[in-house]
Image (cartoon, rainbow, N blue to C red):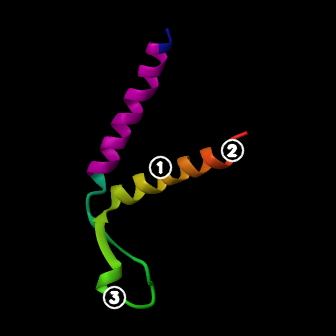
Amino acid sequence: MRRVLTALFAVPLAAAAVLLAVANRDPVRLTADPFRSDPALTVEVPLYLVIFGATAAGVVLAHLFMRR
């Protein structure tokens, strides 16, 4: 029963993640210094990596701070 519930939750979530990644493939520029455009401190990555990275960082930080 638990496997069925997990599959019913995980499959749509995975499909949504794939659709998000396909829809947001355009590169965005991330820089460490917003006031100067130094190419050494700038990297271009697809937007979905920024979204997934921020989500993963949020999950990890929440887990670390919510530990008992």
Q: Which residue is mark 3?
A: 38
Which structural element holds mark 2? loop
Q: In the rendered image, which residue does mark 2 sit on? A: 66
Tag 1: amino acid = Ala
Question: Of all residues shown, which one is farthest toward the bottom?
Answer: 36
**How dense is the environment of label 1, judged by Cα within 10 Å: few (below 14), some, or many (20 and up)?**
few
Secondary structure, mark 3, is loop
- Does the magenta segment cover residue 62? no
The amino acid sitting under disc 3 is Asp
Are circles 2 and 3 on residues that touch, CB within 8 Å? no
- Which of the two labelled residues, at mark 2 and mark 3, occupies the earlier sequence position? 3
Q: Which numbered marker is on residue 56?
A: 1
Total marks shown come to 3
In the rendered view, does 59 fall on the left or right side of 28?
right
* Residue 64 horizontal/vertical position (percent): 62, 47
Q: Residue 55 location, x and y as percent?
A: 48, 51
Residue 17 falls within the magenta-colored stretch:
yes
**Label whose residue precedes the other's in the sequence (1 or 3):** 3
